Amino acid sequence: MKQNIKYLIILFLSSSISSLIAQVGYIEKRNNVGDIVFDASTDNPKFDLIDEINILPYNSICGFLIEGERFRVLEYYCNNFKSDTIDGVTGYITIRFIVNFKGETDRFRVYEMDNKYNPCKFPDNISKSLLELTRNLDGWITLFDDKFDYYNCIEMEKNGEIKYAYDYYQYILFKMKDGQIETILP
C-alpha cells in the first residue's frame, strides 16, 4: 500500500512538472499583446528584424528615441503638417510601428478615436498626411548601453564601447482639435 502511494506521488509530481515545463515553453514563444504582425498588403517583406517574436516594447526604453528627441519631432510635424481647421474633428490618432536594429521603420498601424475613446474615422487628408510624415521621419536611435534579458540584440562596438542594437516598438500619439494637432506624445 505504501509503495502504491509513493508511485502515485511520483506520477503526480512528474505530470505536474511536465505540465509546468510545457506552460513555460508556451509563455516564452507566444506573441505579446500589441505585437504588430506582418501584413503582406501593407508591410515591406524585406524589412529586416533580429527576432520576429521578441521585439522590445516601447515602455522598456522611454520617449522618442530619435536624434534631436522630442523637440525635433514637434518641430518636424509643426513645419510639415498642413490641414484646414475643421470644426468638430477632434480626438486622437495613434500611429504604432517598429524600428529595426538598423534604424529603419515599417509595419505602421493607425488607430483613430474620438474624445470619448470610441473608434472613429478622421478625414483621410489628416490621417494619411500624419502617416506619410511618420513614415518619412528618420534618425531613430537603435544603440543602447544595456543588454535586456529576453530580447535578442546585435552587439556592436562604437567609440571603443560595447553597445546593443535592438528592434523595438514605437508610437506617436496626436491629440487633434478641430483638425489641427494640439499635442504630440510620448
Image (cartoon, rainbow, N blue to C red):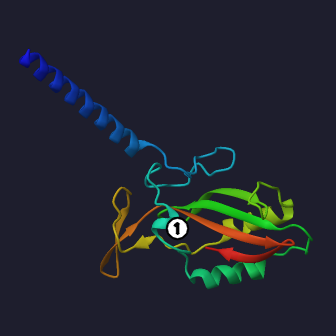
- Quadrant in which residue 161 is drawn: bottom left
Percent x, y of residue 181: 78, 75
- At x 68%, y 49%, the residue is 42
Secondary structure category for the residue under label 1: loop
In the picture, which quadrant includes the C terminus?
Answer: bottom right
- At x 81%, y 55%, the residue is 120
Instruction: Give the amino acid type for the residue marked by disc 1 in the picture.
Output: Gly
Q: Check disc 1: other Cα within 10 Å, few if <14, some if 14-19, many if 20+.
A: some
Percent x, y of residue 125: 85, 64
- Quadrant in which residue 134 is drawn: bottom right
In the picture, which quadrant includes the N terminus?
Answer: top left
* Front residue (pair 69, 11): 11
Q: Is residue 124 above or below residue 146?
A: above
Mark 1 highlights which residue? 103
Q: Is residue 29 above or below residue 58?
A: above
Q: Is residue 75 left or right of residue 145?
A: right
* Front residue (pair 47, 93): 93
Q: Residue furthest front?
A: 1
- At x 20%, y 29%, the residue is 14
